[in-house]
Image (tube, coloured by chain):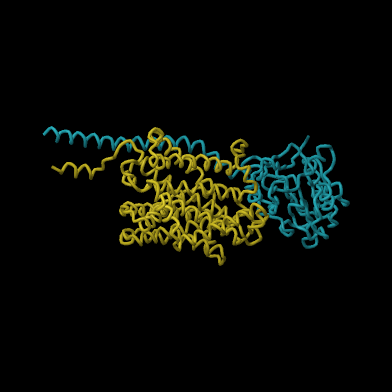
Amino acid sequence: MSKKAFLIDISECVGCGACYEACKEQNNLPKTSDDPLRDTLSDKTYTIVEQRGDYYVRVMCKHCEEPTCVSVCPVGAFTKTDIGAVLYDESKCLGCRYCMQACPFQIPRYEWGSLTPRVQKCIMCYDRVREGNLPACAEACPTGATMFGDRDEMIKLAKQKLAENPDKYYQHIYGLEEVGGTSVLYISPVPFEQLGFNTKLIKTALPNFTHEALSKIPTLVTVGGVLLTGFYWLTNRKNEIAREKFEERKNKRGEE
Amino acid sequence: MNRVIERLLKPTFWKVVATVIFILGIYTIYIRFTGGLAAVTNLNDHFPWGLWIGFDILCGVGMAAGGFTLCAIVYIFNIKKFKPIIRPTILTAFLGYLLVILALLIDLGRPWAIWHAIIMWNPRSVMFEVAWCVMLYTTVLFLEFSPVILEKFNVEKILKVIKAITIPLVVIGILLSTLHQSSLGALYLIVPTKMHPLWYSTNLPWFFYLSAIGVGCAMIIFESYLSAKAFKKNLEFELVSDIGRWIVVVMSAYLTWRFMDLLLNDKLNLLFVNSVETYLFWLEILIGAIIPIVLLSQNKIRLNRLGLFISACFVIGGFLLNRLNVSVTSLQATAGVSYFPSVYEIIVTLFLVTIGVVIFNLAVQYLPVYEKTKETIPVEFEIVTDEELRTETIKP
């Protein structure tokens, strides 16, 4: 199956909360608030709609192209699937929470009160999408603010929208290049920093930073090992010579 | 035997304190494993790593760095005069790592799955590398410390084997330490946009490594001073005093690098911004590097027991502040919430420190940690220094 993505058109969102409700129902999540606009992401809430000024912004896992969580997890509990969804496997997880620490979008949530805590977040309705359906939130959206499809198609659509209505849209697709690209793309009528988006994110995928450090290990171990052993050999030889000389003299004295 | 038990049970002020902390610690751990992390910690979704990671893990591993540093000096660079203090230093390191693992078991959400790292690999993860290094290095430390126990119970055969593999063990230990000491810094390389620029640097692994060596040396001085007082062990003071010189060298390199790094990344202006971060940064640099460097470069202070001890305390204090700054201060602003450890988190940390001190205390009293070290240290032969050679020749 090809790589999928969400396209969220902020200018179309009316803040009805249909996506929020649909997500809760699809994932069997308990009710956490009467007003979808006032709820926050938690282990029981995978997506929210936040009012930011005159606009509404959906917050959810961005399903990065090169996910930080996938790269940092020591036991590989996260996987980037072929459809683009980033999934979590609780049977592997040991609960170090490095994924939460490392996520550039601060998305993963934890079951802090549980004795078998899990990391929780949007899973792009993986099973539904696999069966050829839309994710619950995209299906529920009455205005077309949340669209879903092949990532290439969504990018094409976003570009088309920006080109056809240059006055209506701020000319940037958020998520196209941020941290190496994500599977949730946003287009907006106003600059993204006005909507509280983190616009300082770099275009490089974050795993590159740690990968660079880790890639030095083999050289460090081999060269370091040789150097240390060599030093030992050198300094030890010096002491051996000193000892031989010492014993020689002692023997001489003995003969005298 | 009765006398031993009698002595152990005789109440003193510190024994009472330790007992209180111990009971509170056990109680807290009980709540943690019946009510979850939420019941005892102030951790939350925006601040998933707190005091236990910042202090118990980052500081714990760093303060145990004396083990590999001294091993390198004694075995690799063959400066044998430091042999008398190698055992207590290895003991500290070994205890340190055991406590780090204990802390992990309390902090991890699913501690029973800790062994997963052995079979479920993700070599792209720094945490994976740290996990493996800590596992292997703890084993190495156990083997390096084992002669002390083997001697106590006179197990000659195994002792011989351990002695024979001393050098390979030491080399592996140094390599593993180099890797994970620096990798604890590399853990934070992945949060360039979250971390305060005064601390974020692509050189973080190096800073962690250098400061670990510095604090490792400071810990050797710290312990020697306290052991000398507590157990009336007459340690050769000149030995420990010499370590003070190294601290000056290592911490000067560290200090220079930290500032060069700020200069080269155009961050010097941040040093004069009026913010909590700026003050804490200066405090860390002042306590951990500038003050001890100034103090220890003076013979008068370095050759004075108390002066040396106080200087070491500064290095340790600055080191602790640095690790807490990296793990807490530098991430507060972007997290959007302020985190301060709960009473329970602090109790667990005190609990772990107390266990360490108590076990060290007992080991020194009942195992040959300080005694007989000259004869039985696992080295193939005694080294003759130039001086000994000279005095020996002069003798009739």
**Residue A204 visible at all:** no
| Near-viewer residue (B196 or B222) | B222
Task: Chain letter for cyan, please.
Answer: A
x, y percentage for residue A206? 63, 46
How far from the left and from the top, in percent, is residue A30?
A: 80, 53
Instruction: State which quarter of the image contains the C terminus of chain A.
Output: top left
Find the residue positioned furthest to the right: A142
Point out the image quarter for the N terminus of chain A: top right
A17 vs A77: above or below: below
Q: Residue at x 79, y 61 (%)?
A: A38
Can residue B371 be seen?
yes
Specify the colour of chain B.
Answer: yellow
Toward the front, the furthest residue is B2
Q: Is residue A68 left or right of residue B131?
A: right
Residue B41 at x, y = what percent?
A: 63, 57
Q: In the image, is A200 to the left or to the right of B72?
A: right
A50 sits to left or right of B214: right
Determine the residue located farthest toward the left in the rendered image. Answer: A256
Q: Nearer the viewer, residue A184 or A101?
A: A101
Query: How many numbered marks does the figure carry?
Result: 0
Question: Residue at point 80% right, 62% down?
Answer: A54
Q: Give percent across and percent down for residue B74.
A: 36, 43
* Front-most of residues A163 and B88: B88
